[in-house]
Image (spheres, rainbow, N blue to C red):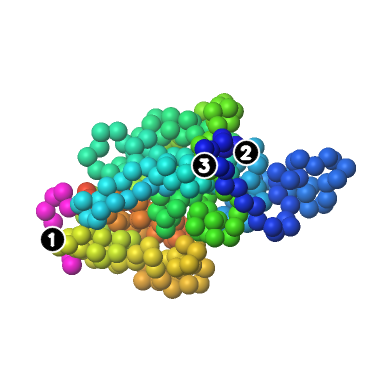
Amino acid sequence: MGTSHSRGRCERHAQTGRSTVRDALLRPAWQLSVADAILIAMPLVPSSPLVSTQWLADHLGSDELVVIDASVRTTGIGRATAWAPAFDDYVEDGHVPGAVFADLVDTLSASGSDLPFTRPDSARFERAISALGVSNDDTVVVYDRDLGQWSARLWWLFRSFGFDQVAVLDGGFTKWQHEGRPIRSGAMSGTARERRSATAFLATEERPVWADRDRVLRAVDGSEPAALVCAAPSDAGGVGRSELIPGSTTIPVRTLVDADTNALLRPKALSAVLEPVLASEEIVTYCGVGTAACVDALALTVLGHERVRVYDGSLADWWREPEPLAS
């Protein structure tokens, strides 16, 4: 699916001996094994918000599967932080074969907002997702090259607009690459992109999975209780700006993932980290700009919590107006 690249294509294949959907589809019918037939007939619907690298390897090549690289490049800290789509990394350093690249910074954020990563309206989201070749009949797997905050953000956006056939690649590109799985460099070819873009994506009415400043204030004053969870490390705001929203519990993303693979901790360990808030009827997660907060929201969803909201804008929004802050 990738085009030729001037510096050569990087394509490595793990020698696992396992059959994949692509392998099975390329075999003549008389050569199909029972395992091949099961793979072909298997419904392409993830049973969890996460899929493993092996699941993705087994299903690469399926017509109904769209893999999205949602990586973002970050520079600076605190108010000096800047973000840019990591498209160059996707092209030059490689990506999962067949993956398309999504621009979370601009295309998949609201136009004209003074806050980074403000969620787009449904029309903007539909246009951006349709341009990636995603239809409502597809299954989507999202990944990034960081701790999962960018893929979790796009996963949360999909779910907020009523699309549930979406999962995050557990461990992202880091785990995929470390396992020696196939990597393709160069951008996706125009013909492949056109072939995937035949059907438009339609969003539903937005679900109540977001929190705004007013909702957070009601949690702070107790008029509408909710556990407030900060997913950013204590120094995320930069020097002198490490304050939290009053009453918050700090559960940074790094405490939720394996230090070597970037995969989420297994359920027992994940429950232990999130135990301070698991019994809360409703949980609002936040961070600096509403991205890392989506990893905490993902982890809570994996554990079965059904009333989780992400504070869109997060501390960037909270700090715009003076409020008593807990440090």
Instruction: Report the amino acid beneath label 3.
Output: Arg
Question: Mark 3, residues whose alpha carbon is within 10 Å: few (<14), some, or many (≥20)?
Answer: few
The crowding category of the residue bearing disc 1, from other C-alpha atoms within 10 Å (few below 14, some 14 to 19, many at least 20), is: few
Tell me the distance, in whole angstroms, between the alpha carbons under discs 2 and 3. 31 Å
Q: Quadrant of the C terminus?
A: bottom left
Measured as percent of width and height from the top left, residue 43 is found at 67, 46
Q: Are marks 1 and 2 in contact (CB under 8 Å)?
A: no
Task: Tell me the distance, in whole angstroms, between the alpha carbons under discs 1 and 3.
Answer: 55 Å
Residue 77 spot, x, y in % from top left:
24, 56
Q: Which corner quadrant holds the N terminus?
A: top right
Q: Disc 2 marks which residue?
A: 64
- Per the image, the residue denoted by label 1 is 324
x and y, in percent, of residue 263 in the image: 49, 62
Of residues 209 and 82, the one nearer the viewer is: 82
Q: Earlier in the sequence, mark 1 or mark 2?
A: 2
Task: Characterize the magenta stretch by its predominant secondary structure.
Answer: loop
Name the residue that disc number 3 marks.
Answer: 7
Residue furthest to the front in view is: 7
Secondary structure state at the residue bearing disc 1: loop
In this view, the mark in front (2 or 3): 3
Name the residue type under label 1. Answer: Pro
Q: Which badge, 1 or 3, comes first in the chain's sequence? A: 3
Magenta-drawn segment? 319-327
Counting from the top left corner in percent of width and height, residue 137 is at 59, 36
Which callout, 1 or 3, points to the residue nearer the camera? 3
Residue drawn at 60 percent across, 47 percent down = 11
